Structure formats: structure tokens, C-alpha cells
Amino acid sequence: MPELTTEQITLGLAIAAGVALLSLIVALVSVAKLRTARREYLVLRGDNGERDIISAVGRALKEVKDMNGRVDGVVAAQEEQAALNRFAVQRFNLVRYDAYDDMGGQMSFSAAILDEHGDGLIITSINGRTEARTYAKPVKALASQHNLSPEEQQAIAGAAAGEGRGEIAAASSSR
């Protein structure tokens, strides 16, 4: 083995000390980064399983899924209700008139009560001095298989046009 000089040994020890110091610094930086990563992981994971962020996100996703199911149910129920509402009374109109020349006060009337399709009924009451007669006729698609008076036709047309919301139409003709 060759003999080393004091300078060579000092240089070798200085290089070894530098490498050791550099290794120590790298190890300390790595430990600091590992400690930071562990803290961040503990924040995410939590100390107890139910209070961590991962569990909270999982619960939130489950709740969103449940809510989507409930919203789908509400939408289906609303569509069903909308389909049923098309058959509910939606249009109406009342026409008052004098059925007889010697009677005043427009005591006779024809009332049309219809759904969205124009189906329903028309009720007519003809009032005289000593008696009143009331008739009901079915209406299908804004028409009836029974003969309709001009006042009944006017009531149906008014209901179809959306009249009758707080208004009373007076017929210009009399029977």
C-alpha cells in the first residue's frame, strides 16, 4: 500500500466531511419534507376515521347520489301531475242574456266549463217569468253532438279564447 502524505489525508478527510455534510443536509431536507407530507396526510386522513376529508367527500358524494334520486322522483311526479292537469277544468266562460223579449235583467245564462283539450260541458239556464229550465250538454273538442244555441257557442268560444277570468260576457242576441 502506498504511503499517503498528510496533505492527501487531510484532503481526503475534507472531501469525506463535505460529502457527509452534504448527505446530512439532504437527509434533513428530506426529513422536513416527509414531516410536512405526513402533516398534510393527517389533515386529509384525520385522526379518527369519520372526521377526515376523504370520508367527508365520500359522504357528500353519497348524499348527492341520494339527492339526484329524489330529484328524479320529483321530476317524474311533476310530469305525472302535469299530464293529469291537462284534464282538469282550465277554461270557463259565462254568457248572460235575456232569453225572452218581455224579460229583463239577463237572468238566463250559458256557462262553458272545459279542460285543456276543449272537453267538458255547457250548462244553460233559461229563465222565464214563471219557470226556469236548465240544460247540460257534453262538449268534446269545443263542439257538441247536441244542437248549440248562439249563446252556448259564444260561451264555448269565449272559454277557448281564455275569457271568463273574472269577466261576464253579455250576449248581443236574444232568443
Image: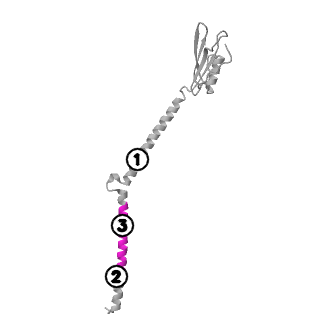
Q: Nearer the viewer, residue 149 or 131?
A: 131
In the rendered image, residue 9, in percent from the top left (x then y), is placed at 33, 89
Q: Are marks 1 and 2 in contact (CB under 8 Å)?
A: no
Q: Nearer the viewer, residue 90 or 3?
A: 90
Q: Which residue type carries mark 1?
A: Lys
Query: What element does badge 1 sit on?
Result: helix
Q: CA distance from mark 1 to mark 2?
A: 58 Å
What residue does disc 1 label? 62
Q: Position of residue 163 (x, y in %)?
A: 62, 26
Residue 171: give x, y in percent of width and height: 66, 18
- Evaluate if marks 1 and 3 touch, with contact meaning CB atoms under 8 Å apart: no
Which residue corresponds to the image point at 37% horizontal and 61% vertical from the top-left? 40
Q: How many numbered discs sit on the rendered protein?
A: 3
As shown in the figure, which amino acid type bears the numbered disc 2? Ala
Question: For residue 152: magenta?
Answer: no
Magenta part of the chain: 17-40
Distance between the Cα atoms at labels 3 and 2? 25 Å
Tell me the element at label 3: helix
How crowded is the residue under tag 1: few (<14 C-alpha within 10 Å), some, or many (20+)? few
Q: Could you give the CA–CA distance between mark 1 and mark 3, rounded to whole angstroms?
A: 33 Å
